[in-house]
């Protein structure tokens, strides 16, 4: 991704810098996606090779003229430490709508980070690129995430045995 496009997609919130991932984020990405505790409420953890392959697919998508996914690293302003990742990707399961995903390091969970960064993403980036609907899948036992998305205005529109499916639709003048 060119520097200009990368800078255009970066944003900040009160407590966090949120920047498009780069090669330097690979080890952090792999550490999150291979950690069983971090991944327990998301999906089965990947092995190292699988995580590296997925990271490389993310970088490849970001290099395309019309990316079908975007991935950002979340860093604390106070010490520039990486605390998680937030991404959106077009998914066939949502009729090419955009799925939202957040992965936080295990010591960063339940601190309001995801809520703050999702609000920033919607209000500063998605409006700019014309995305007004976000989808998400949340495991039924991930009560913290379910409570958060309800508070942000998402609603549950279907369920399967493992996941609840959630959607946020921007209404005129609405902001998180």
Image: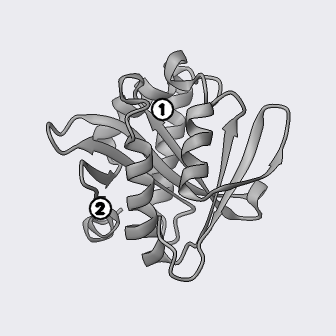
Q: Which residue is mark 1?
A: 52
Whether 1 is drawn above or below 129: the answer is above
Marks counted in the figure total 2
Labelled pair 2, 1 in contact (Cβ < 8 Å): no
Image coords of residue 126 (percent x, y): 47, 69
Image coords of residue 50 (percent x, y): 56, 28
Q: Residue furthest top?
A: 36
Residue 58 appears left or right of 170: left
Which residue is at a point 44% across and 48% down the rendered structure image?
Answer: 115
Image coords of residue 53 (percent x, y): 53, 35
Which residue is at a point 57% across and 62% down the rendered structure image?
Answer: 68
Q: Earlier in the sequence, mark 2 or mark 1?
A: 2
Which quarter of the rendering shows the N terminus?
bottom left
As measured in the structure, the alpha-carbon distance from the residue carrying label 2 to the one carrying label 1 is 25 Å
Packing grade of label 1 (10 A; few <14, some 14-19, many >=20) is some
Image coords of residue 56 (percent x, y): 47, 42
Q: Which residue is mark 2?
A: 11
Residue 144 appears left or right of 27: right
Whether 127 is drawn above or below 31: the answer is below
* SS at mark 2 in the image: strand
Which residue is at a point 43% across and 77% down the rendered structure image?
Answer: 128
């Amino acid at each position: 991704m060119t520097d200009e496009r990368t800078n255009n997609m970066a944003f900040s919130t009160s407590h966090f810098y949120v920047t498009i991932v780069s090669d330097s984020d690979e080890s952090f990405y792999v550490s999150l996606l291979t950690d069983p505790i971090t991944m327990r409420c998301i999906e089965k953890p990947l092995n190292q090779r699988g995580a590296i392959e997925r990271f490389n697919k993310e970088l490849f998508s970001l290099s395309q003229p019309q990316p079908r996914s975007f991935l950002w690293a979340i860093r604390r302003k106070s010490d520039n430490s990486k605390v998680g990742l937030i991404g959106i990707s077009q998914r066939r399961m949502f009729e090419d709508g955009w799925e939202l995903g957040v992965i936080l390091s295990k010591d960063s969970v339940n601190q309001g980070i995801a809520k703050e960064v999702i609000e920033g993403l919607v209000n500063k980036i998605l409006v700019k690129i014309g995305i007004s609907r976000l989808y998400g899948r949340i495991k039924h036992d991930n009560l913290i995430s379910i409570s958060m998305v309800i508070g942000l205005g998402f609603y549950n529109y279907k369920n399967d045995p493992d996941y609840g499916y959630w959607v946020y639709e921007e209404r005129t003048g609405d902001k998180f």
